[in-house]
Image (cartoon, rainbow, N blue to C red):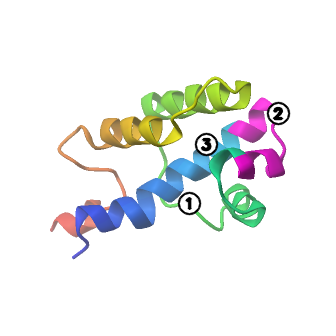
């Protein structure tokens, strides 16, 4: 059995970061710029974009919209507290009974 915190660290946060990376690229950021913005290695961005990392969760439209808005703000340099925004997205994602979509099989 996975604990909820394990699911968040291993599945949810990488999926959110991957989605942000995809949206940053869609906004016109380069992979190098996205890596600087997300404070990660350019190779991590490449893995996010190729589906090798952060691919386990498909987000609903509401969450995808929050991620898109965050990426647009990051691309424009208008967001200074990335951690707080990611936390808000994670809380919103878990709002319905704490389920995040990646651990449904573990609730048996």
The answer for how far apart the CA atoms under marks 2 and 3 are is 12 Å
- Determine whether the residue tagged by mark 2 lies in a helix, strand or loop: loop
Can you say which quadrant of the picture contains the N terminus?
bottom left
* Sequence-earlier tag: 1 or 3: 3
- Quadrant position of residue 95: top left
- Tell me the residue at 33%/35% (across/down): 92
The answer for how far apart the CA atoms under marks 1 and 3 are is 11 Å
Determine crowd level at label 3: few under 14, some 14-19, many 20+ residues with C-alpha closer than 10 A: many
Residue 78 percent across, percent down from the top left:
64, 23
- Tell me the residue at 84%/44% (across/down): 30
Position of 17 with respect to 87 (left or right) is right
Determine crowd level at label 1: few under 14, some 14-19, many 20+ residues with C-alpha closer than 10 A: many
Report if the CB atoms under discs 1 and 3 are less than 8 Å apart.
no
- Tell me the residue at 37%/43% (across/down): 90
- Determine whether the residue tagged by mark 3 lies in a helix, strand or loop: helix
Residue 14 percent across, percent down from the top left:
52, 58
79 or 64, which is in the foreground?
Answer: 79
49 or 24, which is in the foreground?
Answer: 24
Report if the CB atoms under discs 2 and 3 are less than 8 Å apart.
no
- Quadrant position of residue 11: bottom left
Q: Which residue is mark 2?
A: 28
Mark drawn on residue 54: 1
Look at the image and give the residue range highlighted in magenta. Answer: 24-36
14 or 57, which is in the foreground?
Answer: 14
Position of 3 with respect to 47 (left or right) is left
Q: Which residue is mark 3?
A: 20
* Sequence-earlier tag: 2 or 3: 3
* Sequence-earlier tag: 2 or 1: 2
- Quadrant position of residue 76: top right
Membership of 31 in magenta stretch: yes
- Tell me the residue at 43%/67% (across/down): 10
Residue 75 percent across, percent down from the top left:
72, 30
């Amino acid at each position: 059995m996975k604990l909820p915190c394990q699911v968040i660290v291993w599945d949810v946060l990488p999926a959110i970061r991957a989605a942000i990376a995809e949206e940053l690229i869609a906004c016109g950021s380069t992979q190098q710029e996205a890596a600087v913005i997300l404070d990660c290695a350019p190779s991590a961005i490449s893995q996010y974009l190729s589906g090798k990392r952060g691919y386990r969760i498909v987000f609903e439209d509401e969450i995808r919209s929050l991620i898109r808005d965050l990426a647009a703000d990051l691309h424009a340099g208008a967001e200074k507290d990335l951690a707080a925004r990611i936390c808000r997205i994670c809380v919103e994602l878990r709002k319905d009974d704490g389920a995040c979509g990646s651990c449904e099989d573990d609730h048996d």
